[in-house]
Amino acid sequence: MNWARILAYVTGTVDQELLARNEYLAAENRVIKAQLKGRLKLSDAERGTLGEIGHRLGRKALAEVATVARPETILGWYRKLVARKFDGSKARRGPGRPRISGEVEELILRMANENRSWGYDRIAGALANLGYGVCDQTVGNVLRRHGLPPAPGRKHTTTWAAFIRTHMDLLAGTDFFTAEVLTLHGLVTYYVLFFIHLESRRVALAGITVHPDEAWIKQMARNATMDDCGALRGCRYLLHDRDTKFTQSFRAILASGEVEPLALPAQSPNLNAYAERWIRSVKEECLSRVILFGERSLRRALSEYVDHFHAERNHQGKGNMLLFPRETRQREGPMQCRERLGGLLRYYHRVAA
């Protein structure tokens, strides 16, 4: 009998203590919520946790302690939790195969465009090498969706860009540009002929003259095709525009030196882009920023710029590196600035300690 009284007393004390704790926590939550500005932003996981506990408490108990939201709202969170848990909505899939990612679709189109002889199986195999499991039927669906036919129906003609990439080490470009020079007889226009090797970007100044007649251009062709020191040694093709200064005799001398001249279509400077870009560089970075007095001044400016272009100027098309550096890169040591043409061209480098 005594034990029953003691148990009843302890139970009543514990219940009173729990009630007091719950009352305090509810009051504290109301104070904290009153201090907050705006609505509380709860995640789905937080709503699910409150909904599950609120369901166990029941609506009546929730009405006494809930401060975050109304009891109806909290119980609604529980119902949504149960619906997500048991209806399998996350695991359900639509009919057919899942759609491939945009990255894989771009790879399929790239491989088809860059390799026109590749069929569906070949592209699927190349994707498997990269870790993408795509069947040939999916490859065909992607290509048809973008209007690309199977390999036999694609054009097998080689684009100009592909031709340049394939034969870059055997290709050179040539062109003329003009420079205005002050002389004792006034302003004189000089013609500059140059060659540029497409793979290495090496530039050779072939000649400078006021009168680029046929005799002069023929001599330039002979000089360029010399076996030991010609600017076109090792080259198989020479790109040039349809300037009348590139005469038939000029082309014949090149052909006799085993260099095939390729006359580009009229009004298409983009087909000889490397030569055109060099003309723009030498004019913007050098010739348009100096006043040239006499032919010697022009030759000196061009020679200095070519040396700077080869060994001291970084090139984006070559990984932003120097073409033919004279020294290795140093991370330590005093820095020096090498100047050309009175500081017009500058090159910063470190001197080995």
Image: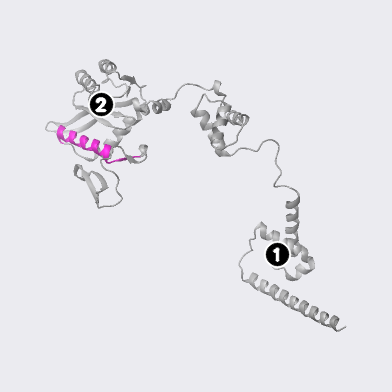
State whether residue 240 appears in this view.
no
Which percent across, then down, holds residue 69?
70, 64
Q: Which mark is residue 69?
A: 1
Residue 254: which quarter of the image?
A: top left
Report how far apart the C-alphas of labels 1 and 2 lie in the structure: 84 Å
| Above or below: residue 57 compared with residue 124 | below
Instruction: Residue type at mark 1: give it.
Output: Ala
Which percent across, then down, holds residue 108?
55, 32
Which percent across, then down, holds residue 201?
31, 32
Residue at the bottom extreme? 2
Instruction: Residue type at mark 2: give it.
Output: Ala
User: Of the residues under marks 1 and 2, which one precedes in the sequence?
Assistant: 1
Q: Is residue 229 left or right of residue 72?
A: left
Task: Tell me the quarter of the image containing the N terminus.
Answer: bottom right
| Above or below: residue 11 compared with residue 91 | below
Comparing 270 with 58, the one in front is 58
Which percent across, then down, holds residue 144?
59, 28
Q: 10 Å neighbourhood of mark 1: few (<14), some, or many (≥20)?
A: some
| Above or below: residue 23 compared with residue 237 | below
Residue extent of the magenta highlight: 293-315
Q: Circle 2 sits on which residue?
A: 231
Q: Is residue 280 magenta?
A: no
Q: Is residue 301 magenta?
A: yes
